[in-house]
Amino acid sequence: MAARLQRPHAAAACLLLCCLTGGLSVPDPRLREALIQLESSMQTGGRVALTDAERRLDTRLLKMKQREILRADFPPAMHFFKARHLIRASPIFSLLQKMPKGGALHVHDFSMVDVEWLVKDVTYRPHCYVCFTDSQSIRFIFSCRWPKPLPRCSQWSLLENLRAEMGNTTDLDDSITANLTLFTDRDPEAAYPSQDVVWDRFEEAFRAAWGLVTYAPVFRDYYYQGLRQFYTDNVVYLELRALLPEIYELDGSTHDTAWTLKTYRDVTRQFTENHPDFFGARIIYTVNRGVNTSVMSRVVEEAMELQRDFPDIMAGFDLVGREDRGRPLWDFRDALSLPAQRGITLPFFFHAGETDLEGTEVDQNLLDSLLFNTSRIGHGFALLRHPVAKDLSRKRRVAVEVCPISNQVLKLVKDMRNHPAAALMSEGHPVVISSDDPAMFGASGLSEDFYEAFVGLGGVRSRLGSLKQLAINSIRYSSLTPKQQEKALALWQRKWDKFVAENAFL
Ligand SMILES: *[C@@H]1O[C@H](CO)[C@@H](O)[C@H](O)[C@H]1NC(C)=O
Ligand SMILES: *[C@@H]1O[C@H](CO)[C@@H](O)[C@H](O)[C@H]1NC(C)=O
Ligand SMILES: *[C@@H]1O[C@H](CO)[C@@H](O)[C@H](O)[C@H]1NC(C)=O
Ligand SMILES: *[C@@H]1O[C@H](CO)[C@@H](O)[C@H](O)[C@H]1NC(C)=O
Ligand SMILES: [Zn+2]
C-alpha cells in the first residue's frame, strides 16, 4: 500500500522538475495527466482497488452520473424538499438504496421513523389524547384517565372522539403530520426564511412528538420500526444518539434512565434475532447543551455508571441541541474532564462546528472537542476554517460525520456542491455519511444523504471506490471493537459482493 501511495507523488514531482528545467512553452501533457491522477488518488476511495465486476458497475454508475449532471433541474443544487421526488426517481438513487451502506453513525432517537407511521399507527391507538397549544402547536399523551391541563395547553381531547365527530379525518391527520416534521410541500425558503425560524420549528416538532414516543409501548415499537427502516435501506449497523428520557406507562408511572437503556438493548437483541443479517446497534447517551454545569456533572456521572453497567450497548456520550444557542463545550470543562481524572473510559462523540458563527465562543467547539479526545466529530461543518482542528482530526483519525440534508434544511448551505465536506472528501479526510434526523427532513434511512454526498459533494470524479470507502469508513470509525469490526465488515462484504454481482451486468 505504502509503495503504491508513493508512486503518483514521485512521478508528479519528477515531471514537475523536468518541466521547470526544460522550460517548455506548452505544459507537458504527461505532467498534466500525472497531476490529475495524483488528485484523483487523494479523494475518499481514490486508492480503493476494484474487482472486475466492480469496474463494470463503476462504468455504469459513471454514465448515470454524467446524465444526472446535465439535468437542468440538478437535484443537489435544489432544496431537498423540492428535490426529493426527483431524487427518488433517479436511477442512481435506486442503486444507492440497494447498496449495502455499512453503518449509520449519526442518527437521533426520535427522528428515525417516517412520521406517517406515527400518525397512521400510533395516534390511532386507544387512550391517545391531543391538545392544541395557544401557539398553534400540538401535544399528545396516552393516559387511562383525563390528563391535567398544561401551562399553554388548556384542553385535552380524546383523539378517538375527535375523529369520530369529524367523520373525515384527512385534514386533521395532515395537520398532525405537518406538526411532526419539517418536510413541507410549500416553498421551503418561504416557510423557513432564517436559521432561527427553522430551528424553532425543529424544536417544536420534537416537543410535538414527545408524548407519543415516550409512551412505553410506543417507545419499544418506535425503535423496532426505526431499526426496520434502516435495515430496509440496507444499513447493517446503527449508533443512535439517545436522550434516554423518562418513559411513562398508561397509569402515569415512569421508568428511569437505566430502564430506557436496557429497553434499547432488549429491542436491539430482538431485532437482530429476527434479522440475523443485521449487525446491531449501540447507544450514545446525549444531553441538551442548554443545561447548567451542575446538571452536566450529574449527567456525566450517570453516563460513567451506564458505561460501566452496560458496556455492550453503551457507546459513549454527546451533547445535543442548537450549538449557536447552547453553551460551548468549554463551559463544561470540569464535568467533561471527570472521566479522565478518574481513569474511567467514557468515549465522547461531540457535535461540533455545526455553525457558521465564525470566531465566536461556539465556533471554538471543534478544537475543544478534540482537546476532550472526541472519538468522532458530529457535522464538523466549520472544520475548513480551523486548520489546526482539521489537521488533528486527520492525524488522530477522528472521523467527521457529514449529514448533508440536515445542513441544508437547517440553512448552513444551499447548494450541495458548495458543502465544505466536498473539500474534505477530495482530500480523503476521514468522513462518514449520515442522516441526523431523517424523519424531520422527510428522508428515510441513509440513501438520500448518500445521494447528496455522492452526486452533489462528490461530483463526477467520485466513483464506486468512494462509495465503497464510505461504507468501510462507517464500520472502521464506529465504536465497535476491532474484533467486532472484522465481523461487521465480513457481513457487509458478503452483501456488497452480492450487490455488485447483481448490478454490474444489467
Ligand atoms: C376528506 O377530505 C379531504 C380533504 O378535505 C378530501 O380530499 C377527501 O376527498 C375527503 N374524503 C372523503 C371520503 O370524503
Ligand atoms: C399544527 O396543528 C395545528 C392544529 O391542527 C395547526 O393549526 C397548525 O397549523 C399545525 N402546525 C403546522 C406547522 O402545520
Ligand atoms: C441548574 O439547573 C437545574 C435544573 O434546571 C436547577 O434545579 C438548578 O437550580 C440549577 N443550578 C444552578 C446552579 O443554577
Ligand atoms: C485526552 O487524552 C490525553 C492523552 O491520552 C490524556 O492525557 C488526557 O487526559 C485526555 N483528556 C481528556 C479530557 O479526556
Ligand atoms: Zn445531530
Image (cartoon, grey):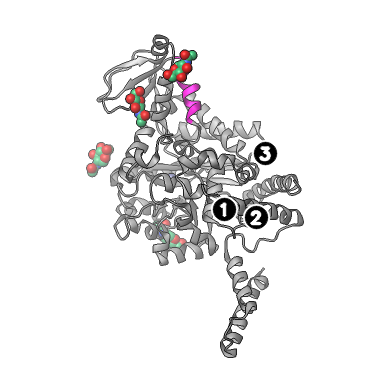
Q: Residue at x 71, y 58 (%)?
A: 50
Depicted 67 relative to depicted 233: above or below: below
Depicted 279 relative to depicted 224: above or below: below
Residue 65: image location, x then y, percent: 61, 52
Front residue of this view, candidates 144 and 306: 144
Q: Residues within 10 Å of mark 1 (few under 14, many from 20)?
A: few
Q: Viewed as shown, does residue 356 lie left or right of 469? A: left
Q: Callout 1, which amino acid?
A: Leu
Disc 3, SS: loop
Residue 177: image location, x then y, percent: 43, 27
- The quarter of the displayed image where residue 45 is located: bottom right
Depicted 423 relative to depicted 105: above or below: below
Q: Callout 3, which amino acid?
A: Asp
Disc 1, SS: loop
Residue 462: image location, x then y, percent: 59, 58
The answer to if 120 sits in the magenta stretch is yes
Front residue of this view, candidates 195 and 112: 195
Viewer-nearest of labels 3 and 1?
A: 1
Q: Earlier in the sequence, mark 2 or mark 1?
A: 2
Disc 1 Cβ-to-ligand 5 distance below 8 Å: no
What residue did someone put label 3 on? 277
Please give the range of residues in magenta.
115-126
Q: Residue at x 52, y 32 (%)?
A: 223
Viewer-nearest of labels 2 and 1?
A: 1
